[in-house]
Image: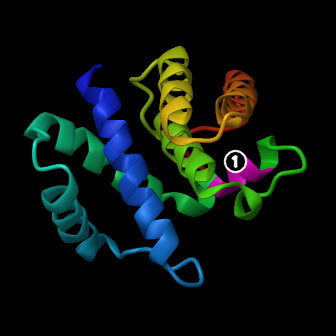
Amino acid sequence: MGKRRLSRKIVLQFLYQVDSTSTGGAYPQSSYLRSNFESFCSLHHEAADGEMLEFAFLLCRGVLENIDAIDGILNSCSENWKVSRMSRVDRNILRLSVCEIVFLSDIPLPVTINEAIEVAKEFGSETSAAFINGILDKIGKSMERGEFGDDN
């Protein structure tokens, strides 16, 4: 398993914790994000190396700084499923994947989708992988049409 997949797992676990403990949609301010993330990693992922943690932090920061835009994209591309109704695992896998797709254009779309599916197989329900694949595929097609981009 590659370092980036391990980074994505760290991100999922951190976002799940933040999602579980935030009240009223309040997420850590950027000034506290780094220290919260480092504390989380020192408790749960002490074996992770610097490269893994930097990529993971990049994703965490990208998700939390762009959460409204990311959730807007998810809401527009998920028929009959608002972000608030999705399971925490699925919601946060989708959030980190949308962050990669929209804000980190150096990662090819098929790689992001494949990684999301693999993480969903490990952490989600038996229907998570198909659900996530369907939404990310729709987002990818919307990106190709120029519907989403860095200006979101």
Residue at the front extreme, as displayed = 126
Residue 130's x, y, as percent?
72, 27
Amino acid beneath label 1: Ile
Residue at the spot of label 1: 73
Residue at the bottom extreme, as displayed = 23
Query: Residue 108 lies in magenta, yes or no?
Result: no
Q: Is residue 64 above or below residue 76?
A: below
User: Would residue 61 appear left or right of 111 to someone viewing this image?
Assistant: left
- Residue at image location 17% in from the left, 61% down from the top: 43
State the predominant SS element of the stretch in magenta. Answer: helix
Q: Nearer the viewer, residue 70 or 116?
A: 116
Q: Is residue 2 above or below residue 27?
A: above
Query: Residue 73 lies in magenta, yes or no?
Result: yes
- Residue at image location 50% in from the left, 57% down from the top: 66
Q: Nearer the viewer, residue 39 or 145?
A: 39
- Quadrant hosting residue 107: top left
For the rendered model, the colour scheme is rainbow
- Quadrant hosting residue 109: top right
- Quadrant hosting residue 51: top left
- Residue at image location 27% in from the left, 50% down from the top: 57
- Residue at image location 25% in from the left, 75% down from the top: 32
Q: Which residues are magenta?
A: 71-75
Residue 69's x, y, as percent?
61, 56
User: Would residue 39 appear left or right of 75 to someone viewing this image?
Assistant: left
Residue 28's x, y, as percent?
37, 75
Q: Is residue 65 visible?
A: no
User: Would residue 30 appear left or right of 144 to someone viewing this image?
Assistant: left
Q: Quadrant of the N terminus?
A: top left
Badge 1: residue crowd in 10 Å (few <14, some 14–19, many ≥20): many
Q: Is residue 14 visible?
A: yes
User: Which element carries disc 1, helix, strand or loop?
Assistant: helix
